[in-house]
Amino acid sequence: MAEYAGFSRRALLGGTAAGVAVGATGGALARAAAVPAQSRPTPLGAARAEFHGPHQAGILQPQQARVQLAAFDLAPDAGRDGLRGLLRLWSQTAARLALGEPVGAHENQVALDAGPCSLTVTVALGSSAFDKAGLAAHRPAQLAPLPAFPQDAIDRARSDGDLFVQIGADDALVAWHALRVLQRQAAGTAAVRWQAAGFSRTPGATAQPRTGRNLMGQLDGTNNPRPGEADFAARVFATGPDWLAGGSYLVFRRIRMLLDDWEQLSTDRQERFVGRRKSDGAPLSGGTETTPVDLARRNPDGTLAVPADAHIRLAAPASNGGAAMLRRGFSYADGVLPDGSPDAGLLFLAFQADPAHGFVPVQRSLSRGDGLTRFLRHEASGLYAVLPGVPAGSGYLGQALLES
Ligand SMILES: C=CC1=C(C)c2cc3[nH]c(cc4nc(cc5[nH]c(cc1n2)c(C)c5CCC(=O)O)C(CCC(=O)O)=C4C)c(C)c3C=C
Ligand SMILES: [Fe+2]
């Protein structure tokens, strides 16, 4: 494939719905046309997510099969100008990556023969970035540190960070390529603080698209807020400050699952800890996966159909003063720990309008009484302001903040 370097991966390999290569020469197009049909990307490879819009990509799109998460810390001398320059560069790069275009100086050809594979890049700022970039006066109150919860075992070296990047794609190489490019472009301005790789169901793995399963085997994501619901935007997108309009607040938790213990339980016990059937995700109060849960329902023997310590009872908006969030987590599996147990679990990611009316009350409630909690360890944590999207045709991520 080396002879194709410098040309659009998308045009080169037969393209997408748009069909026209940005920046490709007539010669490139002629050579692209010569690519045999069997080398063209599948619909999965050619699929792309729009970079531009009121919200960043990677919030509303269906979860991709792969994710790369990374937090970066700004260099001591980066300042506001360094942050602005980096966000400008990353914005250009993210737009090109979303199209499956080569990125320029830091292109390493790792994903050369793949389409964009629905790649999304989502960029957010941690509280510490505001101090380092001289923007403390603009820091939202919502970025106040999360409280410590009972049973937290947070490793700060794998938490926090000035900048956070979520890269999703339906191909591992495409996601890795994007992270590597962003990392190299940041050199001298910001360095990786921590990095984590995750996965979800690959599109096409099931006969029909359906809710993904986590590593405990449950359908996870059923009762998420849905775009189109009346209160969706109010639950997910930030209302302030002004420079964050269209943005969101993201809570990250690396949650290890004690799978050796969990897998000792009967399916019945597992289901009562969650409040839903494992096979099809139906609530224990009856119906199918999408039937609203009836938390008041009782079994013929008088016991609660959804037990008092069931995860969905304690996490429900009805139990937490209406608190809600859009969960978009990915599984991780990073080998085994010294005791032989799997270092595996959930890279929990939740977008919300305000963590004080989202993650914080729900996690407080879970940490007090959730049956699932005894099989979980929260090992890393982060809270970030997800920047608004970039309008088509102009601008860059964080422009309203950096030019305020
Ligand atoms: C503080 C927020 C939450 C954490 C942390 C969390 C961890 C966590 N959850 C599961 C598995 C499931 N969660 C489910 C539902 C659910 N979870 C939360 C919040 C947190 N979960 C909410 C708000 C909800 C929705 C509650 C409702 O209104 O019904 C489910 C059921 C299916 C679904 O709706 O997604 C599962 C399964 C794990 C394994 C986990 C930590 C590793
Ligand atoms: Fe949950």
Image (cartoon, rainbow, N blue to C red):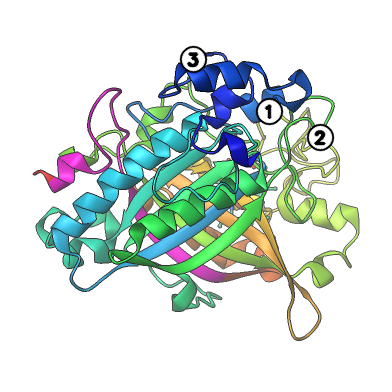
Residue 205, numbered circle: 2
Question: Bounds of the magenta span?
Answer: 379-402
The reply, left or right, for residue 65 in relation to residue 120 is right
Q: Closer to the camera, 283 or 117?
A: 117
- Location of residue 322 with respect to 124 vertically, above or below: above
Q: Nearer the viewer, mark 3 or mark 2?
A: 3
The quadrant the N terminus occupies is top right
Q: Find out whether the residues at labels 1 and 2 contact each other: C-beta distance under 8 Å.
A: no
Residue 44, numbered circle: 1
Q: Percent x, y for residue 190?
A: 32, 65
CA–CA distance in space, label 1 to label 2? 12 Å
CA–CA distance in space, label 3 to label 2? 30 Å
Q: Can residue 235 be seen in this view?
A: yes
Q: Nearer the viewer, mark 1 or mark 2?
A: 1
Q: Is-magenta flag for residue 304?
A: no
Q: Is-magenta flag for residue 386?
A: yes
User: In percent of the image, x 48 and y 68: which residue is there?
Assistant: 194
User: In percent of the image, x 59 and y 49: which residue is there?
Assistant: 110
Would you name the residue on which mark 3 appears?
20
The amino acid on which the numbered mark 1 sits, given as a three-letter code, is: Leu
Residue 94, numbered circle: none
Secondary structure under tag 2 reads loop
Secondary structure under tag 3 reads loop
